[in-house]
Image (spheres, rainbow, N blue to C red):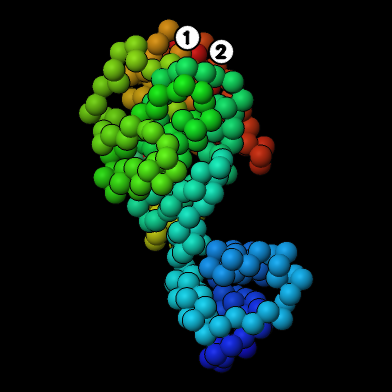
Amino acid sequence: MSGMDVEKIMRLIDFKHYVQDKLCSIYNENESEIIFYELIENFLGITKIKYLVDKEHLILDSEILILNQKINQLELNEPLQYVIGNKKLFGINFKLNNSVLIPRPETEELCSWILSHQLNDIKILDIGTGSGLIALVLKKHINNSTVDGWDNSIKALNLAKSNAKKNNINVNFKLNDIFKKDIPKNKYDLIVSNPPYVSYDDYNKIHERVKKYEPNNAIFVNDNDLLIFYKIIIKKASISLKKNGLIFFECNEKNIEDVFNFLKDHKFKNIDIKKDFRNKKRMLKAEK
Ligand SMILES: C[S@@+](CC[C@H](N)C(=O)[O-])C[C@H]1O[C@@H](n2cnc3c(N)ncnc32)[C@H](O)[C@@H]1O
């Protein structure tokens, strides 16, 4: 099919080849197959299983038109999650666009780890909330919790607010810069953050797709002090977090031990490092 125009009516199986041909220069075969399944599920309502039992199913001109727009975006290297525009996690439908970081599996793991503590009746602060991922998951799954989500990006907060509204979850999202705003004293039982932690030194190793489309201020941190977010949060939490309150971080495996030591220096106890599914040290918990 390569180089040909898409026909007015097409069998799904031919459309699969068409998609994979179109994307072969930027995605490997496995990836483009996954993309095909995501496209037909999200824009045609056809699941992978439905496809496998009826590969001859005909798609219409109007459907091809929509799918072709999406393929054009993918060819420009736009991340699949932005092209799809939403992602369901922990029973919550997250709308996504390029004003927020795409939720990463490590962050889902961080949420699961927090939820495994069976907490109830607590006040939570999520610093650098982005799409609202952590804040909304915790609010939905922790009984009687009150959750505040802070970010210094208006665009990110607008999306987080619309995610809260769409899913009928009540989180207080606020425009706050953690370097300027103090954390209210003795208000929170749990503070969580997945702050920017990638060095500009590593910029060249990051995929073009990420650099071009995801908000750089959500990812990169000045090389002068890679721990700047952890330090300010730990300093402020050491004063403000309730006694025995918990702090959770997602970290860069390269300097998670430094964050550990910084917590220790600030008299946090029961500090625990957790590995992610790739067996990398990526999450940290401590108690005040
Ligand atoms: C790595 S993203 C995490 C997003 C989301 N919590 C997640 O886990 O998917 C970091 C977030 O921190 C926000 N941020 C960057 N600088 C900040 C600052 N000075 N104060 C508050 N938030 C900040 C960014 O806008 C971004 O949404």
Camera-side residue of 282 and 248: 248
Q: Is residue 268 above or below residue 73?
A: above
What is the quadrant of residue 193 in the picture?
Answer: top left
Q: Secondary structure at mark 1?
A: loop
At which x and y percent is residue 231? Answer: 37, 25
What is the quadrant of residue 198 in the picture?
Answer: top left
Crowd rating for badge 2 (residues with CA inside 10 Å; few <14, some 14–19, many 20+): few
Seen at 72% across and 77% down, the residue is 55
Amino acid at circle 1: Asn
Camera-side residue of 217 and 187: 187
Q: Examine the rendering and report whether any part of residue 170 can be seen.
A: yes
Q: Quadrant of the C terminus?
A: top left
Q: Which residue is mark 1?
A: 244
At which x and y percent is residue 29? Answer: 67, 70
Q: Residue furthest left?
A: 180
Left or right: residue 34 versus residue 127 is: right
Crowd rating for badge 1 (residues with CA inside 10 Å; few <14, some 14–19, many 20+): few
Q: Secondary structure at mark 2?
A: strand
Amino acid at circle 2: Asn
- Residue 270, which numbered label? 2
